[in-house]
Amino acid sequence: MTFSPDSSFVAGVHLAENREPRRGGARPSLLILHYTGMSSAAKAIDWLACAESGVSCHYVIAEDGRITQLVPEALRAWHAGASHWRSETDINSHSIGIEIQNPGHQHGYPDFPPSQMQAVVSLAKDIVSRHRMAADGVLAHSDVAPGRKIDPGEKFNWALLAKEGLGLWVRPAPVRSDESGLGPGACCGRVARVQQRLADYGYGIEPTGVLDQTTEKVLKAFQSHFRQRRVDGRLDRSTELTLDRLIEAAHRRVAA
């Protein structure tokens, strides 16, 4: 079986078994970026296409920038798993998933090659434009599944995407070497404020005022995306100021 690709940037199709209609008539409003965590794009495509894997995605982008489509955009792919963003928990029905070939943190985590990043930009711009997605709807897998997933990770060039209008991005506040920040168990109003701001942006977190395991995971996810220099799950001023800048940028975009 085959199908016609949704994007002119697609070099080939390889139909995945795990696909189904989007639930409740949902339309994709989110673009979720992953890394494959496998040794090659060919192996990733074979795995993502077979029924036994229990997963799938819409696109795979190889290191050389070649794009393969596995699931038509009109259908629901199984790429996000248990996840949450804002009030939505069925991320698969509301998103398009791109798997970017990279062996991941467990296997050396190499840089994403320029040719691959350019392909990500080209495909993402096409998808966002056709589906009229908001800039802040371009997210990491780790954003919607903190702790459970850590991809595409701190080496992914979100600033490059932002220059092309993909994703919301702000200049990270400098990291101070003389400040370790608040760690697990910290309990104060500052923690509650940051938890609320993270929830306001979209992360699945409750403002308890305690820096618990959930908060640590969400902080790591936020840092991996927006403050990549140090990803430690601690609440320091750099993380707090970067989050404030991001919230302000989001408010300006809504008001514009």
Image (cartoon, grey):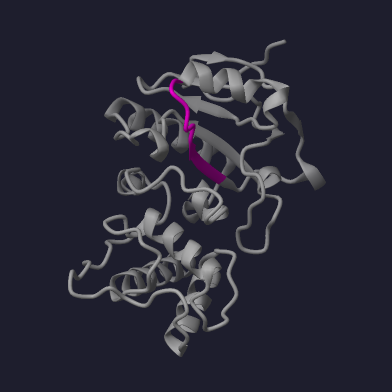
Residue most toward the bottom? 189
The number of numbered badges drawn on the structure is 0
Q: Classify the position of the N terminus by image quarter.
A: top right
Question: Is residue 255 rendered to the left or right of residue 230?
Answer: right
- Give the left or right position of residue 68, taking residue 85 as reference: left
User: Which corner quadrant holds the C terminus?
Assistant: bottom left
Above or below, 61 against 140 in this view is: above
Foreground of the two, 49 or 252? 49
Residue 151, horizontal then vertical, whole percent: 46, 44
Q: Residue furthest top?
A: 1
**Residue 34 counted in the magenta span:** yes
Residue 11 in magenta stretch:
no
- Range of magenta residues: 31-40
Q: Is residue 70 visible?
A: no
Q: Is residue 239 above or below residue 143?
A: below
**Residue that appears at 59% across and 41% down:** 131
* Residue depicted at 60% across the width and 22% down the height: 47
Q: Quadrant of residue 236?
A: bottom left
* Residue 238 placement (x, y as % from top left): 28, 71
Residue 251 seen: yes
For the point 71% across and 50% down, the residue is: 90
Report x, y in % for residue 223: 38, 60
Is residue 175 depicted above or below 54 in this figure? below
Front in this rendered view, residue 25 or 70: 70
Q: Is residue 6 above or below residue 37?
A: above
Name the side, left or right, on which 80 lies relative to 153.
right
Residue 199, horizontal then vertical, whole percent: 55, 71
Who's the residue at 42% across and 22% down the image?
62
Figure quadrant of residue 21: top right
